[in-house]
Amino acid sequence: MPGPRSADGAGDTDTILSLEIPPRAEFVAVARLLVSTAAKSRRSLAEDRVADLTLALSEACTNAIEAHDAKDEADRVLVRVDEDDERLVVTVEDRGLGFDPFELPPHPAVTDPDRLNFERGLGIPIIRTLVDEVTFSSDGGGTTVTMVVRCPPSLGGLPAEDLLDLETFDLEAAWDDEATR
Amino acid sequence: MDLGIDVDDSRTSTPHVVVAVRGEVDIATAPKLREKLVELASQGAQQVVVDLDQVDFLDSTGLGVLIGGMKRLRGLDGDLTLVCTSPRILKVFEITGLNRAFTIFDSVDAAVAG
């Protein structure tokens, strides 16, 4: 499948995973499983960097689902993984209420007792810390979070044709699997 | 993909209640942990130890629940402390600075000894 133009307009990207999940909490675990599997199989990434990406993805999906809750609509959240020679690019796109990441109140210093008033809103700082680049674009029609991890392709990874299954992954079956674990 | 929560309030020598959590704490499962912590606080528990050593994944939703539990218990002159040795889970506390807000022990024995 031809991928989208890369964020900086340079180089060809290929889409290695594309899935739409219902904006429901229980599907975030499925997205984590699929994206981490795609990252591990396609790229040369240390285990802790896969864990970082998985956490960043979870935060982005959580925000997407909460945005849909606020809007109370049944659209899907799109999760896509693209790659080029140097980067893995994970995009989470929702159709919920947009927000301005620059308008978020700054977190007080960790030594400030007020810090504990921030039970929420930790997700975006976590994403910023864990991936090499992140961009947020948001308008009234939804929010797109694009997260970039710089990493070489996996030398011993599965050939692209073996990964085609991922693109038509049976979400319901994966969900049943997860549910019965 | 359920979250396992075991509560051990059998200690008689210390006032600590130990809540052992297993599995993944995220937007889907964190409400279950929140309910348990609220229930314990409303039953009069003051010193709650949350053992995260069997937790495979924890994100900001889980952090929010733990912060909420800690605030609730501190408001009752108690505390919520943690047991965690997994580098991956500890990292979530470190990058958010919350390792300085929580008291984190490396074993349940150390936590109940205070």
Image (cartoon, coloured by chain):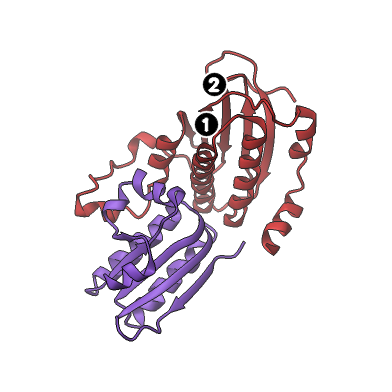
Chain colours: A red, B purple
Q: Residues within 10 Å of mark 2 (few under 14, many from 20)?
A: few
Helix or strand or loop: what does disc 1 sit on? strand
Q: Residues at marks 2 and 1, common chain?
A: yes
Q: Callout 2, which amino acid?
A: Ala
The answer to whether mark 2 and mark 1 are in CB contact below 8 A is yes
The front one of A138 and A161 is A161
A136 vs B37: above or below? above
- Number of callouts in the render? 2
> Is the N terminus of chain B in the top left, top right, bottom left or bottom right quadrant?
bottom right
Looking at the rendered structure, the secondary structure element under dot 2 is: loop
Q: Amino acid at mark 1?
A: Thr
Residue position for label 2: A7
- Give whichever of discs 2 and 1 has the lower sequence position: 2
Residue A101 percent across, percent down from the top left: 39, 36
Q: Nearest the camera: A79 or A133?
A: A133
From the viewer's perspective, is residue A108 above or below residue B67?
Answer: above
- Report the quarter where the C terminus of chain B lies: bottom left
Q: Is residue A102 above or below residue B110?
A: above
Marked residue chain, label 1: A
| Label annotation for residue A89 | none
Residue at the extreme left: A112
Of all residues shown, which one is farthest toward the top? Answer: A10
Look at mark 1 in the image and give the residue it sits on. A146
The Cα atoms of the two marked residues, 2 and 1, are separated by: 8 Å
Give residue B46's position: percent from left, percent from top.
29, 76
Residue plotted at (55% across, 65% down): B3
Residue A32 % position (x, y): 59, 46
The residue drawn where x is 52% and y is 50% is: A71
Q: Kindly identify the residue that appears in the image at 54 percent across and 35 percent down.
A: A46
**Crowd class of label 1 (few under 14; some 14 to 19; many from 20; radius 10 Å):** many
Residue A145 image point, x, y percent: 51, 34
